[in-house]
Image: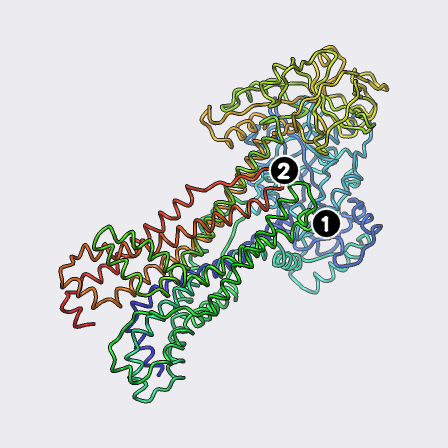
Amino acid sequence: MFSITLKLMKKSARMLIPAGIAILIGTAFIAATFLFGNAMNDALAAQNTAQLGGANYVISPDSGKDLTDKDQDYIYTRTVNDFQLDRIRATEGVKDARASYAGSVTVTRGNKHASSYVITTAAKRTLLPVTITQGDQPADSNEIALTKSVADQLGVKVGDRVTVNSQAAQYAGKTGDSAGNTGDAGDESAQNADVTSSHDGDSDAASGVSASSDGANTADSGMTVRVVGLTDDPNGAYAYYGGASVLSDNVITAMAGSNDFGNLPVYLVYLDIDDASDAATASTVKQISTLLPKHFSVQSRAALVEESVKNMSSGETSITTIFLLSFGILAMLVAALVIANTFQVLVAQRRRTLALLRTIGANKSQLYVSVLFEAGVLGLIASALGVGLGIGLMAALCQSGLMKATGMTMRLVLSGPVFTVPMAFGIIMTVIASLGSARSATAVTPLEALRPIELTDTRRAGVVRAVISMLLIVAGVALCAFSVWQMSENIAGRDSMADKQYPLVLLAAIIGCALIFLGLVLSATFWLPVLMRGVGALVALAGPSAKVAHANIQKNPRRVAATGAALLIGVTLVSTIATGAASAKQTMNEALTTRYSVDMIAAGTDMTGKQASEAAKVKGVQSSIYAPTRMMTMKDADGKSLSVLVVGVDGVDALRKVVRSDSSGVTIDGDSVLMPKYSAATGKDIPLDKSVTFTAGAAEAQADATNGPSGNDANGSAENGNGQSGGTQTLTLKPRKVDYRRIASNYAAVAFVDASHFTNGGIKADGHIMLMRIDTEGAGVALNDVFTNVQNVFSASAGVTVTGPVAERTQWETMINGMMALLVGLIAVAVLIALVGVANTLSLSVIERTRESATLRAIGMTRGQLRRSLAVEALLLSLVSGVVGVVLGTLFGWLGSYMVFSLYGDTVFPFEWATNGVVLGVAALAALLASVAPARRAVKTPPVEALAEA
């Protein structure tokens, strides 16, 4: 029986090809998903262990043990001296040892400044986590190996001299505290204790070695060092910092604000141990272990890599893999509809053959197994090809180097699941999809071999299906209505479940949409043929070809429903995502506009007037204000303290050019201050007395001294706004409240005073702010370009940040567009398979209607008319299903947007004309292309031969 089945498959190969393509695409997607997960795991593991450099062993804190807070404090306050590096290096079998300490410094040459991440050096360059591409690693005092990017930025080469500086070095120099912030550095290091999961395994003294915020002072008080080499970071050990420079021990000690390298806090020591002999290596490790502080041990690189892969497998990459697999499974479910259609027609076509087999002794079980065997063979062949395609696509991706833009170099990593899961899933789904056809095969009786073949399926869908689908739809509508009601109650300020149990309300909406969708797909056999019949009746008025197409599409309502449902799934999901993304962008744009009165803000301690002038000339910046600032404190009418950023401006007219607020009838003079109506911290009204007193004194000056220079001289002493140490300055003004919001979100309020308070010495500025109004439409530029160009203007000043609704809007749009592109791309796989189903349905329809087509040709229908009838039939199938999918997806997108974005503002309900139009256009074009091959088959056979064949 199996040999007969294989012969039948060979005879029907042309009909099986579309189903095979659907399986191939789905399994290729699943295989590529596993390969992508493997490549991500491999790349992240390599990246997370890249900081080991050439080290094959690491001294690190013990993991997996119950450590008390006291133990943790002990671990992360260890210094270089505690590890006895000299004795470790002298141990037999140890080639080199490197204590890991890192941070950030400012590198200066002339009037150019650049920030660079820096690490400790090693005796041998092989132990460094970065590659020395030119010159050598620092060995003697006052040497540095710069990253190539920093060297290019400063215009230096090997042999030149540069100046390095840090806040800790400046602070230690002015206070005489050579210890710097060593204790703080140790605490910061504790955040990155796990070398296998952190991007920064080096001890990072964020508060001890940090970029200077005062570029003007860097050249005067820094250390002059010689550039001995250039570095590259090919393994992405410091991808977050653009690579790392290497400093000699005395320089990195000074940059930490210390005078002794042995006092630097470290918790990782990288070792290069001779591993030629296992016994000798074990002996060396044992000797080193006796020299270590408690709670530290020696771990091999292989163990770290294994732990890293384990962490990745249960972390983000597994989530990514599961996420992608869900779309692979969706693709296979859509493919199952195509497969089911194919086998239904195959069984119907072979009814006479199956009946003849029954007459010569084949029983029902043999026929049943025969159909399932055929499905299994088809699934096996198509799945194997799909796995091969997936491997080929992933290999091409790895070789293309496209992922290097993310900072990771990916390689092809094969594993068992890459082969077993897609093939098993492909075979199982194909067999399941053929079960209904197999049951139909067993219903064929021997007498049917003598009857004419009638392939038209006029069976009515079952009552059980109708009841179940209706219950699903009703339950889904009820859940969605409940969710909307709870959200509206919450927005109105009334008691609502969404206030305390928002995740449950959101989950109810998601489940409701899923139930409605499932109910509509199950009931598609009822409503979709009726809808196509109604649309077809209108189309039939266009002429004979359209009338024939309308008649043909009604002959197999079940197959039409299955094909339409497959396309409906893909189009609905695409439309849902497109609508949700558009609603997210528009809703958040409007929310940001109402929450921020200024389009863009640049603020920092080292901002210069020259930079502000250049930023004002950026295309898209309509108007701007450059003003001095001072952080002060005040108390409201209730006695609560508020941190306030006081900004000096030249009157309210200048402010109106950049701040969106109703400031009519308001003035700013020497006795008044413009205050916001609402607190940026709480969103509540700020109660004010008839006068408010701003304070800048000991507390603020001490904070400045602790954090190093920030536009003032940090000398460790309290300094008031007039530069007089020891006092506290107060400024009392009459408040005038206006509703402007979130000029700078780091402060509870931003107050505008007359600029004369800064020029006459009443307030000493500790920074500057630039307020900008943006007009992208008038300038004809993209929002992101304006933001990027303004950022570039201030790129030389490490202390300047560019924020505001434009920045947040750009981030939102980038994130949403990226997610939308990814999701639409993934769902496009399902749409592609569904369109294969359209082509399959047309091909099968042509085969079924061989006699009918021949008769039409015989009575005068031209080849062109026959082609047009098939094209119209394809368009009806794709466009009707596509339009329903667009409508359904838009409604789902609106519901999802309301449930999520109404928390942030008034939800916008857009219709995504562009994306939906593209989807429908692609569906129509694909349908027309799908009708070409069947049309050629229908018209190439002469009517006489076709009648004889039928």
Q: Position of residue 941 (x, y in %)?
A: 17, 65
Amino acid beneath label 2: Ser
| Residue that appears at 36% across and 78% down | 441
* First in residue order: circle 2 vs circle 1: 1
User: Which is nearer the eye, 442 or 326?
Assistant: 442
Q: Secondary structure at mark 1?
A: loop
Residue 686 appears anywhere in the view: yes
Q: Secondary structure at mark 2?
A: strand
User: Which is nearer the eye, 233 or 678?
Assistant: 678
- Quarter in which the N terminus is drawn: bottom left
Q: Which mark is residue 193?
A: 1
**Mark 2 and mark 1: span between their CA atoms?**
22 Å
Q: Which residue is mark 2?
A: 245
The single residue placed furthest to the right in the displayed view is 726
Q: Position of residue 703 (x, y in %)?
A: 79, 28
Amino acid beneath label 1: Ala
| Residue that appears at 49% across and 45% down | 579
Q: Position of residue 552 (x, y in %)?
A: 27, 62
User: Which is nearer the eye, 70 or 111?
Assistant: 70
Relative vertical location of residue 229 with respect to residue 574 in this rendering, above or below: above
- From the viewer's perspective, tell me whether residue 538 is left or right of residue 225: left
- From the viewer's perspective, tell me whether residue 248 is left or right of residue 149: right
